[in-house]
Amino acid sequence: MKRIILTGGGTAGHVTPNIALLPRLKKLGYAIHYIGSYTGIEKELIEQFEIPYHGISSGKVRRYFSMQNFTDPFRVLKGFREANKLIKELKPDIIFSKGGFVSVPVVMAGKRRHVPTIIHESDMTPGLANKISIPSATKVCCNFPETVKSLPADKAVLTGTPIRQELLNGSKEAAREFCGFTDDKPVLMVIGGSLGAASVNENIRKILPELLKEFQVIHLCGKGKMDESLKDTKGYVQYGYIKQELAGLFALSDIVISRAGANAICELNALKKPNLLIPLSANASRGDQILNARSFERQGFSMVLEEEEITESTLLNAIRELYQNRESYVHAMSESSHMNSIEKITGLIENCVTKQ
């Protein structure tokens, strides 16, 4: 039986594309193992699929000064030794990495053990973990055409991002019942990301009384970010993180507010949900979400409101404008060409395994 190791973690965006590949990989006859950190979100997300999960030590390489910069290299080194031992024991035919810092020692150990490795970059510009991993990779899958130009020509492949197929089949009515909503007002869904976006959460709650006059609101605010004082507010539901019901919540939503992580926006595009993107500020990140958001804005798929521009009035006006013009966004997304990312990536995996 062919054997594959999947890796990636730190945020849900480094895990969900791997989850999207699982049904096809199983159909192709792969025994699947997952390497992630001991306690990261990837452990919780993957274990529900009853796939063998192997934890390793994980450290972060930072672009800024931190005392942890002195200790994390030792964690990465320990992670490399642990990954090397696991790869020796599991004898995989191939490794597929979705990035995040836990993936770096796995990719490097794969190269040392002469195991072909494919990495996937969702953002327009590669993250630091993937930048470190690229020299050890056999192929690099990209989401944006712009990314291909910045990568080694013999490694870069435009594949798009794999989308969980179950997201496309949600039940609107089951979700309405789950939320306790009525059918007399449109539904706005706010997605703060798996780690929760403090400023998005805070600003949505500030304008909630006004919003509820026009919309019912589903608020995915991130683990530990719920506001207990709003628990019984009519027309408003909040969840830390949602799994099985997510497809239904998407089906129920008329418009969506989201961060601009590449996986999130690709899911919105596949679902054809009119969306307002609030990218993570360049002050708090490397600016990749701003590039992602502006790319989708140029193509007519999204509205964009940068974090520094948010006030109660700009946010409320943007939501109203999005709802008013929702059909034009649906039309633009319907006209866009979608590649079958799952088939393309698993085809690449099969090709690398066959060549061995």
Image: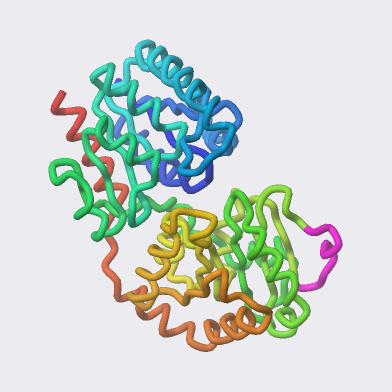
Q: Quadrant of residue 330?
A: bottom left
| Residue interval drawn in magenta | 227-235
Quadrant location, the N terminus? top left
Residue at image point 61% right, 59% down: 192
User: Which residue is at 63% across, 75% downward?
Assistant: 187
Question: What residue is shown at x 27% (from left), y 23% (from top)?
Answer: 111
Q: Is residue 232 magenta?
A: yes
* On screen, residue 222 above or below 249: above
Q: Main secondary structure of the magenta part?
A: loop
Q: Position of residue 250 (x, y in %)?
A: 55, 64
Lateral position of residue 140 relative to residue 24, left or right: left
Question: Residue 202's x, y, as percent?
Answer: 71, 65
- Residue at coordinates 38% horizontally, 16% vertically from top-left? 84
Q: Quadrant of the C terminus?
A: top left
Q: Is residue 139 left or right of residue 285?
A: left
**Count of numbered marks:** 0
Q: Position of residue 7 (x, y in %)?
A: 42, 32
Task: Give 250 or 176, whichever is nearer the viewer.
Answer: 250
Q: Nearer the viewer, residue 341 or 183?
A: 341
Percent position of residue 179, x then y? 71, 64
How is the structure coloured here? rainbow
Depth check: give the residue in front, 270 or 96: 96
Work out whether residue 8 or residue 330 is closer to the camera in this orientation and state it.
8
* Left or right of 295 on screen, residue 73: right
